[in-house]
Amino acid sequence: MGWANRAIALLREGQPAVIRPHGGSMRPRVMSGARVTLEPVAVDDLQVDNIVLCRVGGNVYLHLVTALQGGRVQIGNNQGRINGWTKAVYGRAVTIENP
């Protein structure tokens, strides 16, 4: 979770945050090293296909909302893998600047 600690703290305070995630699970929507701007969001305001910063099972992800049910959010990557359900969503991506 260390890579996202500062962003999570800002989002919890109601402020926007910028991260540069690394990895290939969200390509081509989010490329490794992209500059991603996040804004705080309530779970009730999410939609399927939003990209969110969240925690699932102790891991922090910048992944897709794949389903919504009863105040819970199902999270997956852009390659078809499902990570699980969570209520711990910190922010929603509002801009993605791929390298």
Image (spheres, rainbow, N blue to C red):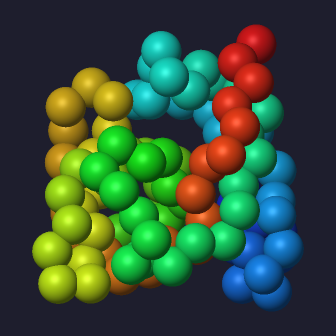
When asked about the image quadrant of residue 41, the answer is: bottom right
Reply above or below: 82 against 26.
below
Residue drawn at (17%, 84%), measured in percent from left and top? 70
Which residue is at 71% across, 37% downward? 95
Q: How many marks?
A: 0
Query: For this rendering, which residue is in front, 49 or 30?
Result: 49
Q: Quadrant of the C terminus?
A: top right
Residue 83 in the image, given as x and y percentages of width and height: 24, 55
Residue 42 visible in the snapshot: yes
Front residue (pair 30, 46): 46
- Which residue is more in the foreground, 14 or 23? 14
**Split into 4 quadrants, where in the image is the N terminus?**
bottom right
Position of residue 11 in the picture relative to residue 64 (left or right): right
Q: Is residue 87 above or below residue 92?
A: below
Judged left or right of residue 19, residue 52 is: left
Q: Position of residue 82 (x, y in %)?
A: 19, 48
The residue drawn where x is 39% and y is 78% is 44
Relative image position of residue 7 (x, y in whole percent): 77, 65
Q: Is residue 68 above or below residue 95?
A: below
Asked which quadrant contains residue 39, the reply is bottom right
Does residue 83 appear anywhere in the picture?
A: no
- The picture places residue 16, in percent across and down from the top left corner, at 82, 64
12 in relation to 89, above or below: below
Looking at the rendering, which quadrant does residue 6 occupy?
Answer: bottom right
Q: Is residue 57 left or right of residue 12?
A: left
